[in-house]
Amino acid sequence: MERGIYFDGWYPNEHNYHPSMPPRRLTMADDFVEMGGTVLVWAGLGGGVISLPYLEDEAFGAVPQRFRQHGYVNESEFIAYAKQHGIDLFGIVFEAQAWEFPAEVQDGVVLAQNQLRGVGEVTTVGLREFSTDTGPADWKPFRHYFPDGLVNSDGDQVTDLWEEVVSRDLEGRPLHAHWVEVDGKGQSCYLADRNNPVWREYLKAIIRIQIDAGAPGVQLDETDVPLLALRYGGCYCKDCVKGFRAYLQTLDTVPAELVGVDLGTFDYRQWLLDQGYHTGTAPQTFPLYAEYCRFLQIAITETFHEVASYVKEYAASQGKTVRVAGNFYDVAPFYEAMVDDVDVLVTEMRETKYQQPWYYRHGVGMAKGRPLVAVENPYGGVTAELLAEVKRGRAHDLFRLSILEANAMGANMSLPYGSWLGTEVKDSYWVPKELAVATGQALVALDPVTTNVSAHSVAVVYSVPSVMRAMMDSDMFSDDGRWFEPAEAPDARPESYWDTIELLSRSGRTFDAIVLPDEGLRADDTDADTFADYAAVIVPDAWNISTRQHRALVDHLDRGGRVVVVGAYGTELADGAAQELLDHAGTTHVATTADVLEHTPRDVLGAFTEHTAVSVHRLEDGSRAVHVVNFDQDADADRVTPLTDFSLGLPGDEGTAATTPTTATLHRPGTVPEQLPVTLDADGVPWVSISTIDLYAAVHLA
């Protein structure tokens, strides 16, 4: 399993100043060895969205002798040092950020940047100065990197890169990546648009420098750009307008609003303005909103594939092998078609909670066998509260749980190392080193009995097209009303997937998330074998299921499988087709999510409560390990209340002496592995009794 470290390395008691991280020291890599890390995310080489010369200075720049005294190195040297210790640093490509910073300059020398101190001429440095060759004197000229310049989709030479690549609102004003700007510092970060071919070429130049600097991995951040611009009321730049025009011309049926309109010259932005729409109105209320969202879903899939593929292509041209990671944020449905383009799936998660094992099970399903590495979100959930408690010397159990629960579910939650706390808090996320090391070493000790391959008998179907509209209409695309008043979708469909998997997790059930793709975004490989290993397949509100996916489920039923349907099913199929599944003898149609439990088998028996979670890992040798997490935090005592005399039964293991487990090894963080007896009850079910489970236990059955 990968063990991630969220290595921003921002300073304590300081704002987290994107996009360039603080200078690296050798001691940092030594810390990572102690913490048991294998991969570093958001870890360096981020300054390309200021300029390419700035990025080269990060990668290869001279380090003053005084700094060498204290172990400071440039990024390429740090990458090599970390690699010698078995740790892969992923260079970060901020795909949505285009920066300009305030600066003070004298005779072409930068005396102050971002944090001014009243010296030199006040100016700016960033992408505009880079593309116009008006930046610092030691910056190589723009044509050094692009000998023929960069030509935009209109056929014009780019003269101002910063203005060229920005996403725009309905009135054509630039949109900002507000989530990374620190107020009061004069920073300006435009929200860049990957639909613009100029920006994609620029991102490729960043990637070349990162690979030349020795980065063993490239992490693509903000992978949904410019779809994410919808939360600000955009994007309506020239390239999005052109792309939407081309998309409309591919449709078999012209939308009713456009009958009689010349699609060869159609300008969506101007068309909306002509009808009186304006910025500050929810895009969800605009005509053609559904079609525009669909265009953006297709566009982000195609452009991400182009950029991710380039990482591999350029690395191969240099005789290197480089892994690609993608930040798929909250693993929303529109990311699913991009998964095949990455080697590591990173999730920043929309909301960080004290207990969310169902989220990790969903992410593991989306990752389809790839490592899933998560990091906390400072803007959503409990991160700031948890950090405040840790600073008081409290909440150590809660911190450990925040890392360990992901491991139990077959994923990885990164250890913080000066990680991001957003732009509103003047601080970064650090925990005491001994706490980070002990938690990291607990993951190392659990690694032999941990995998992302499960041994579960229940599957829950995640139908991408069925949940897509609910996601597009969610508050994620209104930013909690900051930019426009959210609008309720008039034709919103119910969505019960998340309720279903949370209920299962809180009820001591195990499950796998089986993702059924949107066939308009990627080729579908679903067949009856997809469900063959499962005694029960739960299908929550899969109203927009494809003919192929429906056929696979029916074939599974015909083989003797069981399907539990919650809510709507197959309403977009041909008339009457859904009944083949709904009327099948192997199908149970329940009225509510709560009714699922009585039709769901248990893989593990025991006194599980809503404060516990369980998962069964299938190890490489075919044996299994049962992982149990105890979330029962006693706030007054500031510790988790231990489970005592806890017994686990495995009903799937009744059988002959040759097939029933005979030995078990108990693994608990901070203790030596312990051999436990296995006993059989009257029904032949093997049981293991554990005297105490503090936070976590893994029982390996041989």
Image (cartoon, grey):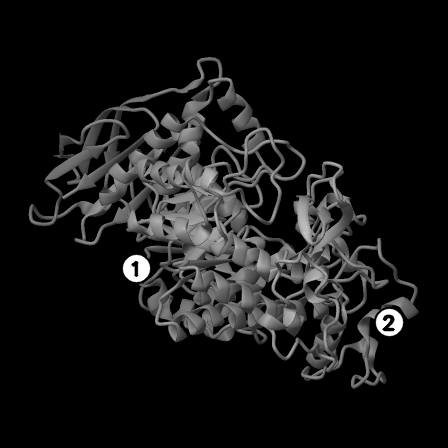
Q: CA distance from mark 1 to mark 2?
A: 53 Å
Residue 262 occupies quadrant: bottom right
Badge 1 crowding class, 10 Å Cα cut-off, few under 14, some 14 to 19, many 20 or more, is some
Query: Which amino acid lies under the numbered mark 2 shown in the image of this protein?
Result: Gln
Residue 439, position in %: x, y? 35, 32
Residue 450, position in %: x, y? 28, 45
Q: Do the CB atoms of the residues marked 1 and 2 lie less than 8 Å apart?
A: no
Question: In terms of depth relative to the viewer, which is nearer, 14 or 195?
Answer: 14
Q: Is residue 477 left or right of residue 380?
A: right
Q: Is residue 159 left or right of residue 68?
A: right
- The residue labelled by disc 2 is 270
Question: What is the number of the mark on residue 533?
Answer: 1
Against 98, is 321 above or below?
below
| Quadrant housing the C terminus | top left
Residue farthest toward the top in the current orientation of the protein: 636
Whichever of labels 1 and 2 marks the residue nearer the N terminus, that label is 2
**Number of marks:** 2
**Residue under the point 66% across and 62% down:** 226
Q: Secondary structure at mark 1?
A: loop
**Residue under the point 31% across and 35% down:** 34
**Residue under the point 49% across and 47% down:** 500
Question: In terms of depth relative to the viewer, which is nearer, 485 or 549?
Answer: 485
Question: What is the number of the mark on residue 56?
Answer: none
Query: Which amino acid lies under the numbered mark 1 shown in the image of this protein?
Result: Asp
Q: Is residue 546 visible?
A: yes
Residue 384, position in %: x, y? 58, 30
Question: In terms of depth relative to the viewer, which is nearer, 700 or 309?
Answer: 309
Residue 649 occupies quadrant: top left
Q: Secondary structure at mark 2?
A: helix
Q: Is residue 93 visible?
A: no
Labels 1, 2: front one: 2
Badge 2 crowding class, 10 Å Cα cut-off, few under 14, some 14 to 19, many 20 or more, is some
